[in-house]
């Protein structure tokens, strides 16, 4: 598609691990090539762009100016706010993540927090949160779509981008601003081990016969009954697998404060 037909996308990295970008690049419907050549114009993404240093910063400034009011802003990572945000500075000019997000949010047509860090603070915001890390929606006053998950699946990321690109509006959101099409059901509702749960067939310890037979992981701390995400049906990495299929319970990674509220991850 011509550049003019594509939606400019600015993707910023804040306090994060890049796992969400790793998830993004595994997209297959559309695949990454099609996504960035047919549907979006990827203006800035620190781990995918060719530019570096001053040139990269110039690209970012240029994109925010040239596409003001039109670009999609995706954010990966929490925003440290203690000491005026100085726990995170990005780029040659020493701007804090907090400054960059506020600036980038002003001209964005829509803002998507990709992953639990950007959505709810994630591991950075876990107790005792020395950097006072926060989710994007807590530091700006515009609507933010929250894609919970550590990371969210590539389908939840790209599906949300494509929804906006195709319909020109935000999808219906739940009480935490997560898209309902992806986060409308509990993991437990669609889990392939749900029959085992209903029959009272539980794994008692990792490696036992029940584990080998695919029994329910509830007694080993599975948080599927309390977590809203489409992992059992959509899976990750080209539909390959998801946590319970791989043999470990859900740890609730799509939920706010899951590091504090859902731990101990291996106890009910
Ligand atoms: Fe990494 Fe998880 Fe944060 Fe994504 S949400 S950047 S995978 S820690
Ligand atoms: Fe529910 Fe977890 Fe058991 Fe699956 S493994 S049925 S999500 S408790
Ligand atoms: Fe996260 Fe649970 Fe899905 S840990 S990846 S919400 S199965």
Image: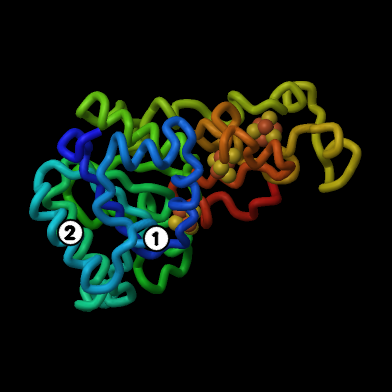
User: Residue at label 1?
Assistant: 47
Mark toward the viewer: 1 or 2: 1
Q: CA distance from mark 1 to mark 2?
A: 21 Å
Q: Is residue 145 above or below residue 263?
A: above
Label 1 neighbour load within 10 Å: few <14, some 14-19, many 20+:
some
Badge 2 element: helix
User: Residue at label 2?
Assistant: 102
Q: Quadrant of residue 89?
A: bottom left
User: Image point 18% across, 52% down: which residue?
Assistant: 105
| Mark 1 or mark 2: whose residue is earlier in sequence | 1
User: Image point 38% across, 58% down: which residue?
Assistant: 77
Left or right of 19? Residue 242 is right
Label 2 neighbour load within 10 Å: few <14, some 14-19, many 20+:
some
Q: Is residue 184 above or below residue 151?
A: above
Left or right of 60? Residue 257 is right
Pick the quarter of the image with the N terminus: top left
């Amino acid at each position: 598609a011509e550049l003019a037909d594509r939606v400019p996308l600015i993707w910023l990295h804040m306090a994060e691990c890049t796992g969400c970008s790793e998830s993004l690049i595994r997209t297959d419907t559309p695949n990454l090539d099609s996504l960035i050549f047919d549907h979006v114009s990827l203006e800035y993404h620190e781990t995918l762009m060719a530019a570096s240093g001053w040139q990269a910063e110039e690209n970012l400034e240029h994109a925010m100016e040239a596409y003001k009011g039109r670009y999609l802003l995706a954010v990966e990572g929490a925003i440290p706010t203690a000491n005026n945000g100085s726990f995170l500075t990005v780029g040659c000019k020493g701007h804090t993540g907090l400054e960059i997000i506020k600036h980038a949010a002003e001209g964005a047509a829509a803002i998507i927090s990709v992953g639990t860090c950007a959505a709810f603070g994630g591991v950075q915001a876990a107790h005792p949160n020395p950097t006072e890390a926060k989710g994007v929606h807590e530091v700006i006053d515009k609507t933010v779509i929250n894609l919970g998950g550590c990371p969210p699946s590539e389908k939840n990321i790209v599906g949300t981008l494509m929804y906006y690109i195709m319909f020109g509006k935000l999808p219906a959101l739940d009480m935490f601003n997560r898209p309902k099409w992806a986060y409308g059901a509990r993991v437990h509702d669609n889990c392939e081990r749900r029959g085992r749960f209903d029959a009272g067939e539980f794994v008692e310890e990792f490696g036992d016969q029940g584990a080998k037979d695919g029994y329910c992981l509830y007694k080993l701390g599975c948080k599927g009954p309390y977590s809203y995400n489409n992992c059992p049906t959509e899976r990750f990495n080209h539909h390959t697998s998801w946590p319970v299929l791989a043999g470990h319970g859900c740890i609730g990674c799509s939920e706010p404060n899951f590091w504090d509220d859902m731990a101990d991850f291996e106890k009910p």
